[in-house]
Amino acid sequence: MINDQRGCAINVIPKIEEILNDLKKQLIKVAAIMSDSVAAYASARWQLRLKYP
């Protein structure tokens, strides 16, 4: 799980995309992603919003 790993946005984005792709294959819709790592996830959120408008 992501919570067990320390990382920066560069490491977090591929993991988030992997999880979202797995959920999409299972036809599960995601309303939100929660995190306790503010800096890494704020950066990842910004980058993902640019990639997936």
Image (cartoon, grey):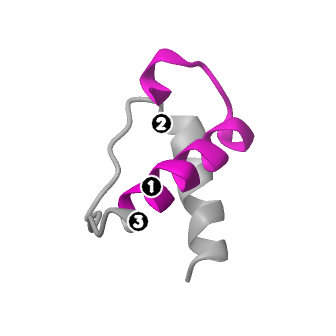
When the figure is inspected, residue 13 is found, relative to residue 49, above or below; the finding is: above
Q: Residue at 52% of width from left, 43% of height from top?
A: 41
When the figure is inspected, residue 9 is found, relative to residue 33, above or below; the finding is: above
**Numbered disc in front, either 1 or 2:** 1
The main secondary structure of the magenta stretch is helix
Three-letter residue code for mark 2: Val
Q: Measured from the top left, where is residue 31 in percent x and y?
A: 25, 65
Tell me if 40 is positioned left or right of 26 in this view.
right
Q: Secondary structure at mark 3?
A: helix
Where's the C terminus, which quadrant? bottom right
Three-letter residue code for mark 3: Lys
When the figure is inspected, residue 2 is found, relative to residue 19, above or below; the finding is: above
Q: Secondary structure at mark 1?
A: helix
Q: Residue at 32% of width from left, 43% of height from top?
A: 34
Stretch of the chain drawn in magenta? 1-23
In reply to whether residue 14 is colored magenta, the answer given is yes
- Report which residue position mark 1 lands on: 22
CA–CA distance in space, label 3 to label 1 = 5 Å
Tell me if 25 is positioned left or right of 8 in this view.
left
Crowd band around label 3 with a 10 angstrom C-alpha radius: few (<14), some (14–19), many (20+): few
- Pointer 2 or 3: first along the chain: 3
**Numbered disc in front, either 2 or 3:** 3
- Report which residue position mark 3 lands on: 25
Residue situated in front as seen by the camera: 22 or 30: 22
Q: Are marks 2 and 3 in contact (CB under 8 Å)?
A: no
Q: Residue at 56% of width from left, 55% of height from top?
A: 17
- Report which residue position mark 2 lands on: 38
Q: Please tell me the numbered disc located at residue 12.
A: none
Where's the N terminus, which quadrant? top left
